[in-house]
């Protein structure tokens, strides 16, 4: 097999994206720590918020700027790992990492508020994300997207935005914003898992290569221009992805569908556990309050007898 380093440092590590990622992290800490007092209603940055935001940005770079992105254009299974993390984990971390006061400032802009209010309605957010995810993985759609750089960037942004809207009702803590409460969150997450299952099943049970950008040498080489400079590709004598892997195309494709479901189930399982324990703790706290109130009422009645 040929090594990935033949594509060069820029293709492997995307230094410009790395610099942009570090810049965003730096600006984040300037606004949340150094310049925070300039904003009315601001609150000190919590450690868990900082960890969530930095994790989201570093994970974003890992899937879109590291060798993972290059591998995602060679192996469909790695592409599905990339998409699972980009759409099912990073948005939740991103929402959690931005302090509520910053979200309030952002949503004070009427246009942003109107867009969020409409697209984060729970049922609509669920259906829109599931529809985008499913249509994106139709062979004719994915192959077309991967052959046009501007279209690939646009569709990736729209997919990420739909994932952000999907997670908003269960992660955000802003009063007055669309939210799913209590055990309804469990139903919401399970509903999302069910709705994307058909797309994964189509991939898992396919017995023939579905995507020409992973099976046809000419289409694959054209798609590689998304992450490798054309000038570099022109100097290489490449026939197809089989030069970099021993895995048959169909097996790689099926593995991708399985990996997507596994990662989705793990991420959703963690959130379901967190939601359940939060609900249980809330119920216990409410029960203690009710018991304490009943005791106080009984003592008050006894003192008047």
Image (cartoon, helix red, strand yellow):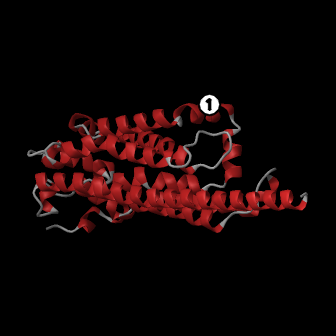
Residue 16 visible (yes or no) = no
The C terminus lies in quadrant: bottom right
Q: Which residue is mark 1?
A: 114
Q: Is residue 228 above or below residue 2?
A: above
Question: From the viewer's perspective, is 175 left or right of 166?
Answer: right
Q: Position of residue 246 (x, y in %)?
A: 11, 64
The residue drawn where x is 69% and y is 60% is 291
Q: Is residue 58 visible?
A: yes
Which secondary structure, mark 1? helix
Q: Please tell me how many numbered marks the rendered image carries.
A: 1
Quarter of the image where one finds residue 245: bottom left
Residue at (77%, 54%) from the top-left corner? 42
Q: Nearer the viewer, residue 23 or 62?
A: 62
Rendered location of residue 250, percent (x, y): 11, 51
Is 283 on the left or on the right of 193, as rendered?
Answer: right
**In this view of the protein, which residue sits in the foreground, 274 or 67?**
274
Residue 286: x and y in percent read: 65, 57
Q: Residue drawn at (39%, 64%), measured in percent from left and top?
A: 13
- Residue 201, image x and y in percent? 21, 45
């Amino acid at each position: 097999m040929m090594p990935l380093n033949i594509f060069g440092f820029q293709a492997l590590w995307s230094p410009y994206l790395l610099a942009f990622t570090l810049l965003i992290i730096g600006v984040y800490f300037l606004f949340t720590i150094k310049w925070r007092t300039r904003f009315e209603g601001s609150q000190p940055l919590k450690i868990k918020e900082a960890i969530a935001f930095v994790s989201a940005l570093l994970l974003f770079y890992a899937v879109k700027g590291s060798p993972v992105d290059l591998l995602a254009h060679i192996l469909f299974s790695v592409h599905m790992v990339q998409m699972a993390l980009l759409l099912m984990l990073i948005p939740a971390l991103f929402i959690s990492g931005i302090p509520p006061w910053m979200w309030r400032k952002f949503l004070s802009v009427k246009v942003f508020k109107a867009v969020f209010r409409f697209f984060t309605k729970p049922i609509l957010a669920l259906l829109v994300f599931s529809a985008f995810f499913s249509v994106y993985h139709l062979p004719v759609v994915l192959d077309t997207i991967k052959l046009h750089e501007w279209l690939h960037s646009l569709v990736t942004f729209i997919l990420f935005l739909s994932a952000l809207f999907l997670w908003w009702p269960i992660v955000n803590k802003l009063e007055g914003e669309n939210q799913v409460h209590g055990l309804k969150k469990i139903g919401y997450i399970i509903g999302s898992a069910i709705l994307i299952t058909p797309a994964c099943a189509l991939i898992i049970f396919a017995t023939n290569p579905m995507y020409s950008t992973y099976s046809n040498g000419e289409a694959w080489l054209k798609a590689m221009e998304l992450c490798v400079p054309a000038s570099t590709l022109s100097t290489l004598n490449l026939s197809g992805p089989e030069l970099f892997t021993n895995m048959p195309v169909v097996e790689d494709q099926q593995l991708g569908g399985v990996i997507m479901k596994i990662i989705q189930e793990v991420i959703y399982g963690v959130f379901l556990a967190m939601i359940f324990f939060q609900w249980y703790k809330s119920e216990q706290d409410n029960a203690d309050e009710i018991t304490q109130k009943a005791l106080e009422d009984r003592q008050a009645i006894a003192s008047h007898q």
